[in-house]
Amino acid sequence: MKLLTRLNLAFGLLLLFLFVVTVWLMNNLLLDALIDSQRKEMREQGKAVMLHQTSLHSNDPERKVDLVTRILSPGANMAFMYSNNQTLSLAGSESDSGYAEIVQNAQELAIGEDKVWKGQQGTYLIETIQTNNVSDKLVVASPMERLKSLQLSIIQRMILIFAMGALFALLLSVLITRRLVTPLSTLRDELHKVQNRRFSEVQRVEAGGEIGEVASSVYKLAAELDGYHKTQKEFFQNASHELKTPLMNIQGYAEGIRDGVFQEEQAKHGMNVIVEECERLKRIVTEMMLLAKLDIEEGIFQHTEVSVSQIIAQTIEKLDPLALQKRITLDYKEDESAGSGHPPFIYGDPDKLLQALVNVIANAIRHALTKVSIHTYCKGRQLIIEVADDGNGIAEEIVPKLFYRFVKGNDGENGLGLAISRAIVERCSGTISAANRPEGGALFCLSFPLLER
């Protein structure tokens, strides 16, 4: 059964349950309320009679009957005076079919204490009012059928009103649940695409509230998985290419030396090429293994307190020869607010962070024209490290996937350095991003949570 049907069915059953309970309670409470109201009216009529006690003390029975008949309301159409063991009928009461039966039982009703009397003609409410003359009693009877008829009329109107309200609520529920469930059904279809690895076909589901947030997350997840899936394909292609090129060079020179094609200086040059290509292969394999370890091994990181100033100083010292070779100036600036007057610390693996910074800053040195700027500052509870160069910037088409494996810009080495930096930074609870500066050149931004000391 679909979710929309289940929700509407559950809401309909809830309305039905509330309807049955409400009718049952109102049926009982309403009858009690009508009985209490009728008894109150009958007692008030009796009190009105007793106020005319002088007239009631008269020995003229007809005068008593006429007085009581005028006081009693037309609704209490069955009443009689019980005086000196005699029953005095009141005008208007004789017309009721059950009046004769009540008069026949006058003594029982006048002397008894029953508030409800059941005869052959029906059930009646009985109120006996004692006048100031102990020998006179006013007995007022009201048929229960009249109250039950009124009760049924009120219940029918309530049922009609409740049914109209329930129909409106059910229609409103259908509209609301359809509005809620339709995005979920669409989202389910998009998740099936993710399950079948059709990441590029996933569409954004327009919805509000928490459903909209989930839909947006699914869309971003699909985009990330699509990029990762494409990168995996490119990884094997690029890895095979990166490994194949040095292997072909090694094979070519080795066969040439073996067959005597290269001799003396050429053979010496060929041996140097073989050594260089072996070193290149070693670097690629080492970096590929490091990336694999960063992805799957938990114990590879030794987290501790890391002084950002010290780690950047070590990075600059390590890259000074490369900067001198490229004739690039390294400019390091640390805001006084960083760390609130104290050297800022973050939590991470110092050796791995050093490697990440070396990769990022070395990349900036290779692409800079004259200068690389390193700037650290605090923003809220985050420590920001910015590395900017004055080169030609990053090609716009590779900016979104710059940190993927084997993605190389101009003059790139093997496309693994920035991927390693990203893996290290993220394992240290940080983020890394890259963009082009408006004034020219590239800007790398690394953000880490500040360590509270």
Image (spheres, rainbow, N blue to C red):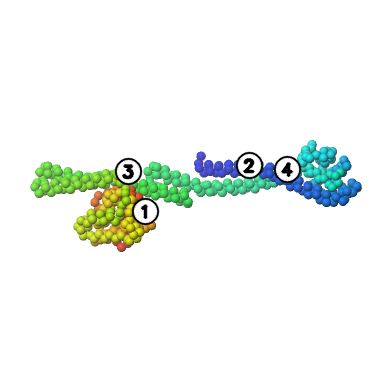
Question: In the image shown, does 168 or 65 lie closer to the viewer?
Answer: 65
Marked residue nearer the N-terminal end (3 or 2): 2
**Is 57 positioned to the left or the right of 157 in the image?**
right
* Numbered badge on residue 189: none
Residue 288 image position (x, y, % from top left)? 26, 45
Residue at the spot of label 2:
20
Marked residue nearer the N-terminal end (1 or 4): 4
Which element type, helix, strand or loop, lies under badge 4?
Answer: helix
* Numbered badge on residue 452: 1
* Numbered badge on residue 298: 3
Residue 100 image position (x, y, % from top left)? 84, 40
Marked residue nearer the N-terminal end (3 or 1): 3
**Is 367 positioned to the left or the right of 27 in the image?**
left
* Numbered badge on residue 148: 4
Q: Is residue 54 visible?
A: yes
**Mark 3 → mark 2, Cα distance in angstroms:** 61 Å
**Mark 4 → mark 3, Cα distance in angstroms:** 80 Å
What residue is drawn where x is 32% and y is 48%?
303
Question: Is label 1 or label 4 in front?
Answer: 1
- In the rendered image, which quarter is residue 26 located in? top right
- In the rendered image, which quarter is residue 17 located in? top right
Q: Examine the rendered structure and indicate whether residue 395 appears above or below residue 6.
A: below
Q: Is residue 92 visible?
A: no
- Disc 3 marks which amino acid? Glu
Marked residue nearer the N-terminal end (2 or 1): 2
The residue lying furthest to the left in this view is 264
